[in-house]
Amino acid sequence: MFGVQKEWHAVASWTWNAQDETCGICRMAFDGCCPDCKLPGDDCPLIWGACNHAFHLHCILKWVNSQTSQAHCPMCRREWQFKG
Ligand SMILES: [Zn+2]
Ligand SMILES: [Zn+2]
Ligand SMILES: [Zn+2]
């Protein structure tokens, strides 16, 4: 039993990842489509914000429309602006 020491790196080292593979709004994978669509692909594109977070276009549009004032990124809370 000597030398056994529990270490708890996991909690402290967790960070969100800009290269997330799932949409931060609907939690569906980026290689799939949003819950409103049946088929992934050109009909359900991904869109990036100025903060470099990506979402399904349909998800972020719904999010932006649900905000009463300036929309903020659901992931980082920066002011949401479509990139490009
Ligand atoms: Zn989504
Ligand atoms: Zn969609
Ligand atoms: Zn963001």
Image: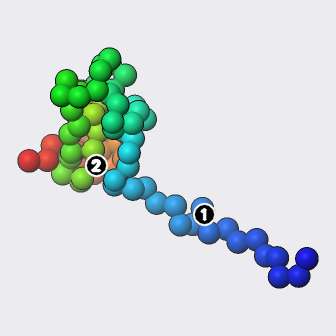
Label 2 CA crowd tier, 10 Å (few <14, some 14–19, many 20+): many
Q: Seen in the image, is 59 located left or right of residue 84?
A: right
Tell me: residue 60, above or below residue 75. Answer: above
Quarter where residue 21 is shown: top left
Q: Measure how far apart labels 2 and 1 are at the Cα level.
A: 23 Å
Residue 4, placed above or below residue 72: below
Q: Which class describes the residues within 10 Å of circle 1: few (<14), some (14-19), or many (20+)? A: few
- Residue at 23% x, 37% y: name it: 46
In terms of image quadrants, where is residue 71? top left
Tell me which colouring the rendered structure shows: rainbow
The residue positioned 21% from the left and 46% from the top of the image is: 49
Q: Residue furthest left?
A: 84
Q: Is mark 1 within 8 Å of ligand 3?
A: no
Earlier in the chain: of badge 2 and badge 1, it is: 1
Q: Secondary structure at mark 2?
A: loop
- Residue holding disc 1: 10
Label placed on residue 53: 2
Q: Quadrant of the N terminus?
A: bottom right
Is residue 67 visible in the rendered structure shown here?
A: no
Disc 2 under 8 Å from ligand 3? The reply is yes
- From the top left corner, tell me how far across and down residue 10 is, in percent: 60, 63
Q: Secondary structure at mark 1?
A: helix
Q: Quadrant of residue 58?
A: top left
Residue 54 in percent (x, y) is at 27, 44
Place of residue 66 in the rendered image (x, y in percent of width and height, measured from the top left):
29, 27
Outermost right residue: 1
